Image (cartoon, rainbow, N blue to C red):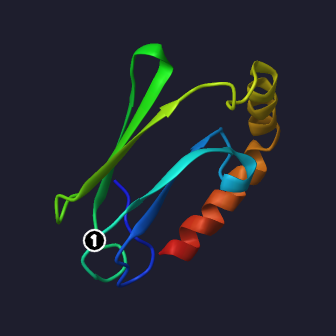
Amino acid sequence: MISCIRSLKKRDLIQVYEGERVRTKDNYLLSKFELTSIPPAPRDVPQIEATFDIGIHSILKISVVNKTTGRSNRIPIIFDNSRLSKEEIERMVVDAKKYRTEDEKVAQRIQARNF
């Protein structure tokens, strides 16, 4: 379950990343799309449910639903030649292990700032 971090938003940009790190800048952007027609509400009130499903032929299907309005959007992500290579994925896993302590500190700062 995710929510909007700003009050009175009417749309939310959903970004999907591949990777093991805490910050998006350290991961690979797979795709992005918008969930629109969100009724204006205070921060953290909109409840948005995200579902990830890997189907045949390695197609990742992402669906998001605003639990208040029922409004939804979905996108398939097809892993083609633009995807990371095996070596790049292995490097990202090694980096995630290498920077684990630093990432935990970043996650704690982010968590503290959001509450």
Residue, disc 1: 37
Mark 1 residue element: loop
- Residue 102 visible from this viewpoint: yes
Residue 107, given in percent of the width and then of the height, sits at 63, 58
Taking 93 as reference, is 57 above or below it?
above
Taking 87 as reference, is 82 above or below it?
below
Lateral position of residue 66 relative to residue 15, left or right: left
113 and 26: which one is in front?
A: 26
**What residue is rendered at 71% in x and 51% in y?**
103
Taking 102 as reference, is 42 above or below it?
below
The crowding category of the residue bearing disc 1, from other C-alpha atoms within 10 Å (few below 14, some 14 to 19, many at least 20), is: some
Lateral position of residue 17 relative to residue 82, left or right: left
**What residue is rendered at 75% in x and 19% in y?**
86
**What residue is rendered at 47% in x and 15% in y?**
57
**What residue is rendered at 69% in x and 32% in y?**
82
Lateral position of residue 58 relative to residue 71, left or right: right
Residue 19, given in percent of the width and then of the height, sits at 65, 38
The amino acid type, in three-letter code, at marker 1 is: Ser
